[in-house]
């Protein structure tokens, strides 16, 4: 058992570090939940892609560099330590791409992935509906068979990035009268196609981080169906596991925040406030725990294990850690903590990050759902009732 | 990087688990509390047969000289089964102290008996460990006073009583001690290993409390269904599982740090202790809540583990002390 990085990984780390030092924009980009910031982030993603860093773990033919999971962890650590921009296309890179690798055709991979890596196409997710939140399997939007493809109708909501994105992916009911997990189809669709109407929704911070999508007979060719029609649920589970699990939230971001918090404490913390000192220490300890837990997961996966219900342990832990890190920083900053943007001493890093962190225990499966999954699948406690026996928990 | 237990380590853990699962440890704990050590010492002898008492003793003193991860794996199982006695002292801190002292005669005269399990050691190291555990049965009774290593005579009075009745604590009388050696590096290493051993036992005890609570929640029926079907119960147990899952990597990471001699070892051991104690204590409180009144009885085993966890929570350095050390060690590293 060791935590040593081999020569190759160390070289990779130093190469990434140098590139980031030379290329990360000095002034932070505007939020990607604004029209202007979105395009700034798109340009940044293209720059990353040109250097081969947009999706390091992918095969080279699609724009990746075939990094091992360990190298991916190292990349993420360096990326966030360097203060590099948030990833505007993370829905695509970390949710849709793994689904395509598992269930897509070679043609789909060749068509979709390189454009995704460069963010020529930025992806939104389209899972939730007004009456299908935690209980995704109760979704009602439909896909109706037509010549050469399907016609999508219905309404999706809470679609992250949809306000400015180019395309989306999600589940629709393709077999009329089917219930729950049966009779669903997984499709990719163009957000600018005829019959699509996107209505941006302002989030807590007033920015348009997600949107409603109204669909009225939107044509999707057969080529944009992933997996078999009717088998969409199983296909989507690949994505769900990736969202909750390792891919979307590597430890790098939390470690960078924890180091920043410790730096803030040592620079301007009130050393007589021992209660706050303990919280700062705890937040760092928890970020470190998550890093080591991930090292164990990576080892397990590289030896043929799979993610399973541990992905819910993962998500419960990091989403709370993220809130805790930011709450502690705000308490440390005192009355000035409420300031945002240019007015804030830190450029609004902590206040903006706090609002972002608050969404963590909700998206990708709420805390309550994750705890059910941990209790039932990891601990083997009995399911609540037979009516919900097929509940997936997404 | 390969950050997972090896097959050998998992097998070793299973063999200790199998041995202890076959023993009636609650009976041994209760007997120990009443001053009847024999059933507990029988467990120690079985552990010695598996090599557990020799793990931290170097080979040149008839030990195994195993890695610290191996030691932690064994101590998690010992904590899981709440084996009574001066575990952290005899299996980790004192072997580390004597092996590091550089006093070969002293080590040669004491360590082989610790390795074979024929001798048990206790250690007082104030302020983190203000009393000597089981000093009445320990052949080797040491006390750290600053950099000095002192030996003290066998106490003749009754033990101080602890919230965990199986922890028989003794005041070490002033005077009448013998100075054995002086060494700062060795005393620091003893403290690191003792703290890590305490953390390992806490993670193990927490896991037992979780497992027994899950079993109980599956079988106890109220309002016509197992209480483990209610989300209020499920969610408490899921939180315990999550905290324990994340405490374990810190524990193993600290063990790796001890062996690799990295300069972050103090930070890592303290982080492991903080996380292990918090996770185990949450497991203990939750176990009591899930079991309800039966868990609050002296007859039920839950209380043995609960009070063990409470006692170990503050042993080998308080949470506040370890958190302060983590922050102190991080000074100058933050961004």
Image (spheres, grey):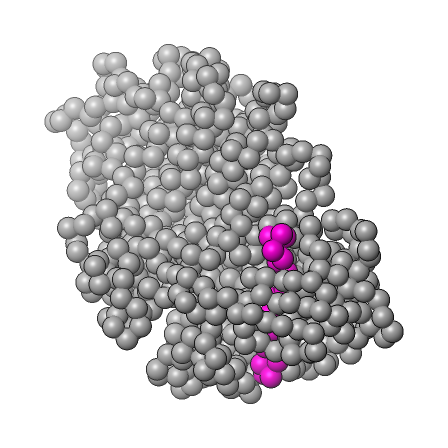
What x and y, as percent, mark residue B67?
A: 46, 48
When asked about the image quadrant of residue A332, the answer is bottom left
Residue at 54% x, 27% y is: B212
Residue at 42% x, 44% y is: B58
Residue B230 appears in the rendering: yes
What x and y, as percent, mark residue B153?
A: 22, 23
Secondary structure predominantly adopted by residues drawn in magenta: loop
What x and y, as percent, mark residue A322?
A: 41, 57
- The vertical placement of B65 against B139, above or below, is below
Residue at 41% x, 26% y is: B306
Q: How many labels does the image show?
A: 0
Name the residue furthest left. Answer: B175
Query: Is residue A128 shown in magenta?
Result: yes
Residue B6 relative to residue A26: left or right: right
In this view, the residue in front, B207 or A164, is A164
- The vertical placement of A150 against B198, above or below, is below
Name the residue furthest right. Answer: A147
Residue B211 appears in the rendering: no
- The vertical placement of B220 against A94, above or below, is above
When asked about the image quadrant of residue A149, the answer is bottom right
Numbered range of the magenta stretch:
A116-133
In this view, the residue in front, A309 or B202, is A309
């Amino acid at each position: 058992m060791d935590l040593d990085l081999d020569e190759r990984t160390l070289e990779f780390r130093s190469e990434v570090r140098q590139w980031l030092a030379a290329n990360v924009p000095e002034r932070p980009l505007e939020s990607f939940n604004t029209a202007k910031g979105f395009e700034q982030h798109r340009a940044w993603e293209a720059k990353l892609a040109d250097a081969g860093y947009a999706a390091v773990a992918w095969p080279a033919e699609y724009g990746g560099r075939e990094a091992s999971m360990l190298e991916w962890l190292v990349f993420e650590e360096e990326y966030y330590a360097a203060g590099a921009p948030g990833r505007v296309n993370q829905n695509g890179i970390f949710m849709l791409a793994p689904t395509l690798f598992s269930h897509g055709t070679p043609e789909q991979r060749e068509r979709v992935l390189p454009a995704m890596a460069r963010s020529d196409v930025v992806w939104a997710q389209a899972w939730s509906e007004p009456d299908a939140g935690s209980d995704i399997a109760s979704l009602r939007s439909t896909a109706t068979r037509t010549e050469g493809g399907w016609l999508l109708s219905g309404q999706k909501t809470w679609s992250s990035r949809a306000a400015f994105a180019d395309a989306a992916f999600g589940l629709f009911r393709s077999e009329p009268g089917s219930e729950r997990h049966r009779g669903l189809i997984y499709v990719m669709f163009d957000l600018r196609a005829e019959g699509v109407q996107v209505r941006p929704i302002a989030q807590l911070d007033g920015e348009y981080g997600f949107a409603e999508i109204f669909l009225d007979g939107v044509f999707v060719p057969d080529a944009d169906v992933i997996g078999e029609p009717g088998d969409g649920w199983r296909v989507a589970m690949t994505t769900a596991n990736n969202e909750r699990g390792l891919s979307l939230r590597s430890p790098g971001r939390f470690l960078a925040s924890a180091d920043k918090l410790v730096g803030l404490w040592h620079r301007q913390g009130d050393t007589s406030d021992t209660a706050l000192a303990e919280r700062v220490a705890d937040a760092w300890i928890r970020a470190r725990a998550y890093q080591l837990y991930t090292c164990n997961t990576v080892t397990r996966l590289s030896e043929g294990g799979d993610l399973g219900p541990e992905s819910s342990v993962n998500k419960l832990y990091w989403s709370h850690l993220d809130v805790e890190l930011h709450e502690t920083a705000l308490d440390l900053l005192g009355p000035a903590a409420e300031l945002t943007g240019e007015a804030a001493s830190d450029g609004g890093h902590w206040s903006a990050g706090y609002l972002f962190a608050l969404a963590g225990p909700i998206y990708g499966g709420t805390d309550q759902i994750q705890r059910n999954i941990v209790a039932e699948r990891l601990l083997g406690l009995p399911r609540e009732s037979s009516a919900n026996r097929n509940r997936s928990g997404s | 990087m390969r950050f997972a237990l090896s097959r050998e380590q998992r097998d070793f853990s299973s063999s200790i688990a199998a041995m202890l699962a076959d023993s009636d440890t609650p009976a041994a704990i209760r007997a120990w509390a009443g001053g009847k050590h024999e059933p507990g010492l029988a467990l120690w002898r079985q552990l010695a047969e598996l090599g557990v008492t020799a793990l931290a003793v170097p080979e040149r003193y008839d030990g195994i000289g195993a890695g610290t991860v191996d030691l932690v794996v064994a101590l998690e199982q010992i904590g899981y089964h709440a084996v009574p006695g001066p575990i952290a002292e005899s299996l980790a801190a004192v072997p580390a102290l004597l092996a590091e002292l550089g006093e070969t005669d002293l080590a040669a005269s004491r360590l082989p008996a610790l390795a074979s399990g024929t001798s048990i050691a206790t250690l007082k190291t104030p302020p983190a460990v203000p009393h000597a555990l089981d000093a009445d049965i320990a052949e080797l009774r040491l006390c750290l006073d600053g950099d000095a290593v002192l030996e003290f005579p066998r106490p003749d009075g009754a033990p101080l009583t602890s919230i965990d009745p199986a922890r028989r604590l003794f005041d070490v009388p002033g005077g009448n001690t013998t100075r054995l050696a002086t060494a700062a590096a060795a005393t620091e290493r003893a403290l690191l290993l003792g703290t890590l051993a305490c953390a390992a036992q806490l993670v193990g005890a927490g896991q037992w409390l979780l497992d027994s609570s899950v079993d109980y929640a599956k079988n106890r029926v109220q309002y016509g269904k197992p209480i483990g079907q209610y989300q209020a119960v499920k969610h408490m147990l899921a939180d315990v599982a999550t905290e324990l899952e994340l405490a374990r990597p810190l524990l193993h990471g600290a063990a790796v740090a001890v062996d690799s001699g990295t300069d972050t070892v103090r930070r890592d051991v303290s982080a492991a202790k903080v996380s292990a104690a918090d996770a185990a204590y949450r497991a203990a409180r939750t176990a009591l809540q899930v079991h309800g009144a039966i868990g609050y009885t002296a007859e039920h085993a839950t209380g043995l583990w609960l009070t063990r966890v409470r006692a170990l929570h503050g042993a080998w350095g308080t949470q506040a002390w370890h958190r302060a050390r983590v922050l102190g060690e991080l000074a100058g590293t933050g961004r």
